[in-house]
Amino acid sequence: MSYRPIKAQNSNNVLLKSVSLQRLIARAQSVDHLQQLLNQYLQPAAREHCILASYQAGTLTLIVTNGHWATRLRYQQKRLLEQLQGIAEFNEISRIQFKVRPPMQSEQPATRSIALSEQAGQAIQASADATRDPALREALERLAQHAKKS
């Protein structure tokens, strides 16, 4: 028995035929709309640290990047709740819940780079030349190699 791949279909056809995909897209658009409304009432600095997770049964759940921002938003919770109750989309809101979830970190750590001026490289090389300790001399010479050559 051989594998026969399904023929590729136009994405619009797939979306029109799948009710579950239509519901998922409608839910995503709804959450995006609520996030935009929420952003109008958040401080500009807090917007990048706060994401709307869900709004069900009068509870607005917000995901915050760290405890610092969760604390700051908890202090503003009463004001934010009163402002959001004035919007038709949030008229049934009775509670705001904050959950801390740090952002996902990339798998590779950031590479470190050393940028030294030519003058600094010469000074480090002079120190290496004057040093008697061979391990320290070797380390200083490696460091001096990072200097920019003009």
Image: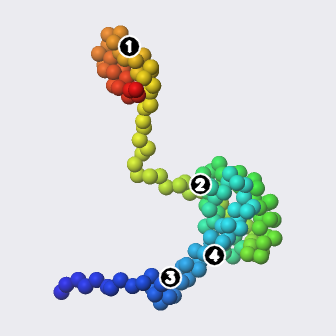
The crowding category of the residue bearing disc 1, from other C-alpha atoms within 10 Å (few below 14, some 14 to 19, many at least 20), is: some
| Image quadrant where residue 130 sits | top left
> Would residue 37 be found to the left or right of residue 20 on screen?
right
Disc 2 marks which residue? 65
Disc assigned to residue 30: 4
| Residue 143 showing in the rendered view | no
> Would residue 12 be found to the left or right of residue 67 on screen?
left
Rendered location of residue 121, percent (x, y): 41, 21
> Would residue 12 be found to the left or right of residue 80 on screen?
left
- Which amino acid type is shown beneath numbered disc 3? Leu
Dot 3 or dot 1: first in sequence order is 3
Rendered location of residue 42, percent (x, y): 72, 58
Dot 1 or dot 4: first in sequence order is 4
From this view, report whether residue 54 is shown above or below residue 17: above
In what quadrant of the picture does the C terminus appear? top left
**Foreground disc of the pair 3, 2:** 3
Element marked by disc 1: helix
Q: CA distance from mark 2 to mark 4?
A: 22 Å
In what quadrant of the picture does the N terminus appear? bottom left
Disc 3 marks which residue? 21
